Amino acid sequence: HILFQSARFNALDGVKELEEALEKYRSKDPKGFQQGNSDALIKRFLDSNPSNSRFVLGWMVASNFRKSVLNHLEQSNRPGVQTILKNRNLQSLNVFYPVASAGGQPFDSALLLIGLLYQEDHLSSEFGQQVELLAAQVNLGKDTRHLEAMCLDILSLSKRMNWGQLTTFMQKIESVETLRTLTHHAMRSEEMLPRVFSSLRFAESGGLLADYLRRFPETAPRDIQLGIVNGQEALRHLLQRQEPVFVSSTREWLRSHGLFNTPSAQLCKLTLRMPMFALLIKYLLYLFGSFFILRFLHQLKPEPEDASGQMQVDGIGFLRQQILALIFLVFVIVLGEPFLAQDSKKVENTPSWRFPVMQSAVTDDVESIMETKITQITILALVLFFLVQVCIYALCLVKLKEIKKQDAHSGLKLRLLDNEENLFDSGLYLGLGGTVLSLVMLALGIVKPGLMAAYSSTLFGIIFVSALKIFHVRPYRRKLIVENETERA
């Protein structure tokens, strides 16, 4: 039924036929439709304890149903099951009431449900080991918050799933953190549960899906929906790449009008087979395109009629255009690449519903993704400021080389050198501008590069301008001064 909802939300082909088949199955086997599969054990429990609910939690709240499950689990020879049942004796809890108290029904339901999933091998081996270890640690007096968080996740899922759906979901879970992430996203809205369930059903690993949802909480629902619409292999490729999908409005418009379909399909196939090669081709085209544009603009520039036109050095203009093309490429990569400057946001996986029995939250201190002080946008800003200063440094060296190659006396070269003083200081000006711009963007909340990245812009400017003047301009100026005095003498 959840897969049908996913197909309906995604407007897939064959939804009408699927709905008719689902209705036939419901009329043919009402109990099988209720529990979601043909599990004989659950069928026996439901026969002994009839329930009108289609969801697992509706069964578990009935005391007779819980007694049947408890009797079944107490006969188990598996140590893990007995370890989980011992958790029913816990007294010091943060969210739940103890099982023996008047409000102990939710905690008892969660533990018995976990034990039943464990006993019937509906948990993956990795997750089953974590559950057993967590239950054993709690029995030894360790903190119960992680266990209670897991119980909340299980209850949240059982509130909206039948037995067949719950077991299918749990078989793809590899860790407690994966369960927490997927449950959090599945319970966010009515449409998210079918989307997460169908994605998990066709994904190779629940961990990959959880990682994707954690890394891109804003765009992941749209992207996994796109993967589902395009088939199982498309979804798996998306989760393997762990990258957001960029949808170009221009490309979609061209495709909707039947334009560029064949070339676009061929380019997509090339990119899929050799992604790094395709990326290299893309950047080379950017580089050559910017270089040819600069060459074209240079040809449009009128020739100077004064003596300065005779002082042009062959090859220097060509070298300058190459450096400017590199600067353009850097800005294109930073500003043109989607999601490159988008930092992954931390998602707090809080339970979708709570029992009003305690005011403390179970997940306040639950382990979550470590939020690093140096974020992706900070690193990107540092690299951008550094590369810009390197390019300006190279341009200044080119200008210095141009002055050196002038066929003029030392006095004229000194004046030309003084005339380029502002160019040699441009790295410092740009560094200060980068700092101010970063602080303004940080204050407005447009992009948050961090104070370290903001101040590094000025720092890089100071370092490169100092290196240029101390190691290049100053020695050459000293040489020209000596030559000028010698010529006068």
Image: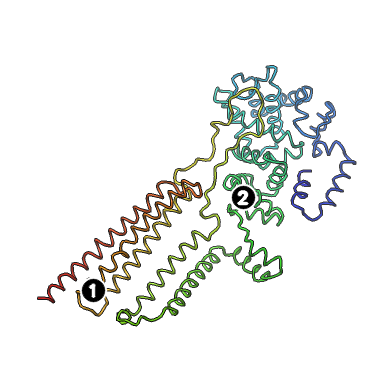
**Quadrant into which the C terminus falls:** bottom left
As rendered, which of 173 and 382 lies closer to the eye? 382
Quarter location, residue 206: top right
Q: Pointer 2: what residue? A: 219
Name the amino acid type tagged 2: Thr
Q: How is the image coloured?
A: rainbow
Residue at disc 1, secondary structure: helix
As drawn, the residue found furthest toward the front would be 306
Q: Residue furthest right?
A: 28
Q: Secondary structure at mark 2?
A: loop
Relative horizontal placement of residue 403, taking residue 145 as reference (left or right): left
Residue 19, given in percent of the width and then of the height, sits at 84, 48
The answer for how far apart the CA atoms under marks 2 and 1 are is 58 Å
**Residue at position x 64%, y 61% from top?**
249
Say above or below: 311 vs 330.
below
Q: Kindly identify the residue that appears in the image at 73 percent across and 33 percent down.
A: 159
**Nearer to the camera, 378 or 167:** 378
* Left or right: 432, with 347 as reference point: left
Residue 183 at x, y percent in the picture: 66, 38
**Residue in the image at 77% along x and 36% along y:** 162
Compared with residue 230, is residue 30 higher up or lower down, i.e. above or below?
A: above
